[in-house]
Amino acid sequence: MVHIDPFDVSDEAIDYSKLIKEFGTQPISSIGNLPNIKHFRRGFVFSHRDFDVFLNAIKKGDKTSIITGINASGSLHFGHKWTMDLVIALQREFNLPVLLTISDDEAYVTGKVKSQEEALENSKLIAAQLLALGFNPNKTKILVHQKYTKIYNLAIKLSPRCTMNEIKAIYGFDMSRNPGQWFYPIIQAADILLPQELEGKHHVLVPIAIDQDPHLRLARDIAERAGYIKPATIHMKFLRGLKGGSKMSKSKPGSAIFLDEDPKKAVKLCMQALTGGQPTAEEQRRLGGDPDKSVVIEYLGAHFIDDDNEFKKLVDDYRSGKILDGETKQLLARHVESFLASFQPKVEEYKKDIDSYLMVD
Amino acid sequence: MVHIDPFDVSDEAIDYSKLIKEFGTQPISSIGNLPNIKHFRRGFVFSHRDFDVFLNAIKKGDKTSIITGINASGSLHFGHKWTMDLVIALQREFNLPVLLTISDDEAYVTGKVKSQEEALENSKLIAAQLLALGFNPNKTKILVHQKYTKIYNLAIKLSPRCTMNEIKAIYGFDMSRNPGQWFYPIIQAADILLPQELEGKHHVLVPIAIDQDPHLRLARDIAERAGYIKPATIHMKFLRGLKGGSKMSKSKPGSAIFLDEDPKKAVKLCMQALTGGQPTAEEQRRLGGDPDKSVVIEYLGAHFIDDDNEFKKLVDDYRSGKILDGETKQLLARHVESFLASFQPKVEEYKKDIDSYLMVD
């Protein structure tokens, strides 16, 4: 069985429609008028809670904002980029303030990094990468827990609104874990409710990958009890790993292309990606490839081919055997190389005075 | 059976020598050369861990400091004053830096105050009262968790050095408590280890009432695992409540004289205190009183009569029937009234810019 929680996702193909039932969420198709953003058009966003309410609030001109978070275990990879591209697109489409929280504390208490110093270094790299991806620096706040420890005060404020039994029921922790791990969900809830705490009650959207949904459930329950508006959420599918599997992930060796990867090495990784092709070129020309199986096609569609017709043509040509694996890999490799070559200097530029972009106590 | 933990002390007479066995500590009498401070001379300090090591470090001229903490549930009372008088005496005797931590977060998560704002107000009052009691402002740091949220970072740093099972074993919490309560012990450990974190490994003394010993056990265990010197501790008996019982306590109605009490009302409280006298003045003159039973005598000795011979004379005269309850009460009332009348304006003075005395992030 596929296992999905905030700390572990098993490496099998995921049936997302089944997840909607399991998690008790709404299919995104229940909303008629979705934003004209690639991630929605191509079915990457598959589920939601109260996204209709959030869109209505925007339409009515009510105060709205976005908050989403990233773990500080290391450099972002293309899986993160794909989800952050959606948040950036939403920010642009609706001119929304965005709060990005980087959980360096969680990275440390779960053992993903060895020290708080390492977690802080990672956080600064990630913050620079997020800005370089295209967040509007004037409408975006970046919060690193170690630098904005005031978040502890909000977590404490919210704490009497839930019990350890609830945390146990949602996360299934056992008592051999450390107190920081058990406390982290309430810090995460504080992150999610911080925009309303700082700027008054308003409609907040939390775009997340589906594995983070337990955090949302707790935050929504606490929100109701503490007098905030329940935050809305949209659930994103995972970008698959280089060799296939459920998701691109730092914890699955060989599955990720990191945004700080040397561009030449990234090219080599692209050439090793899973395809949907046949054993020989001759067979592929004759029988065609399976575009749904090809991670190469998936990455091209997600990151580089924005025009839907152009992407459809690529998929059709691949299915018919007109385009072979080698060509798709070359195409992906060129895109990845050129993206990283122009992205990485931007990151270096932001890193120079990254502290000025971080929220301070 | 007497029940003693950091959150509850049952209201019966306490057999302190039994506690030494139960808690696995050392009797203070095992140390030959105790400081010449009233609290030691009169048997108020009854037990310790590594106090001999701490005194040796002072003798050798090694770096040493004191840290102790107070809950922010409300104004200090004479029970707190008696323990703080000891810390002040130690600071003076050995010219020691002192860190005073005020746990406004604990007061809130345990429901002792209704809001963080109330906890912060209390903290500022307490900080001003501590300074007015006589701590040296140049050698004393005051830390309020809500104002110095960086303490969260140290708690997170220490967190992987213990498990929830250990917290459960030490505190006996159940899962209906909130996450802030379960996390608080690690914040408390962070308080205790902060002096070494900020200023390098050194010998730290933590003077506490015996009910706080569980916090020390956890902090000492974590200290060892995290590479700090295990903090030493001395255990203080409780000052009894006005009507007798185990301790003067805010949570035991009618047991306390608060330091912010109206002096005239405090006089009335003194007149209602438990004595060791006889039903009539005639009988008391004939049979004498029981000085050990008299809370009035206890308070006079603790707070106002520093000279041991003078105090011995009072006790003897009381036992022999030479001094009656009415006289001891009058004596106590005059002392309390005059103390409060000169103390409270000092508190107001410190309150004016109390923020400048608090540690900031």
Image (cartoon, coloured by chain):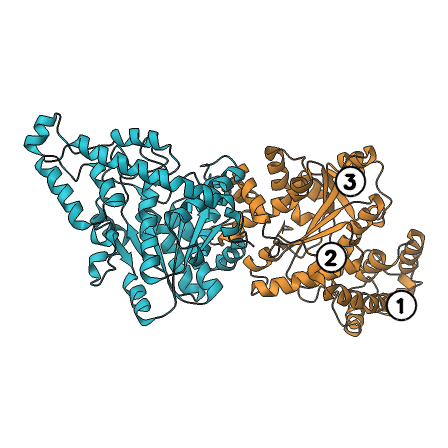
Chain colours: A orange, B cyan
Can you give x and y, in whole percent of width and height, for residue B188 in the image? Answer: 44, 52
Q: Which residue is mark 2?
A: A80
* Residue B253 visible (yes or no): no
Q: Residue furthest left?
A: B286
In space, the residues marked 2 and 3 are separated at their CA atoms by 21 Å
Can you give x and y, in whole percent of width and height, for residue A176 in the image? Answer: 47, 54
Q: Nearer the viewer, mark 1 or mark 3?
A: 3
Q: Chain of mark 3?
A: A
Q: Which residue is mark 3?
A: A28
* Residue at point 65%, 48% (across, down): A212
Can you give x and y, in whole percent of width and height, for residue A98 in the image? Answer: 74, 48
Mark closest to the chain's N terminus, 1 or 3: 3
SS for callout 3: helix
Say the numbered circle drawn on residue A327.
Answer: 1
Q: Specify whether disc 2 shares its chain with disc 3.
A: yes
Which amino acid type is shown beneath numbered disc 2?
His
SS for callout 2: helix
Mark closest to the chain's N terminus, 1 or 2: 2
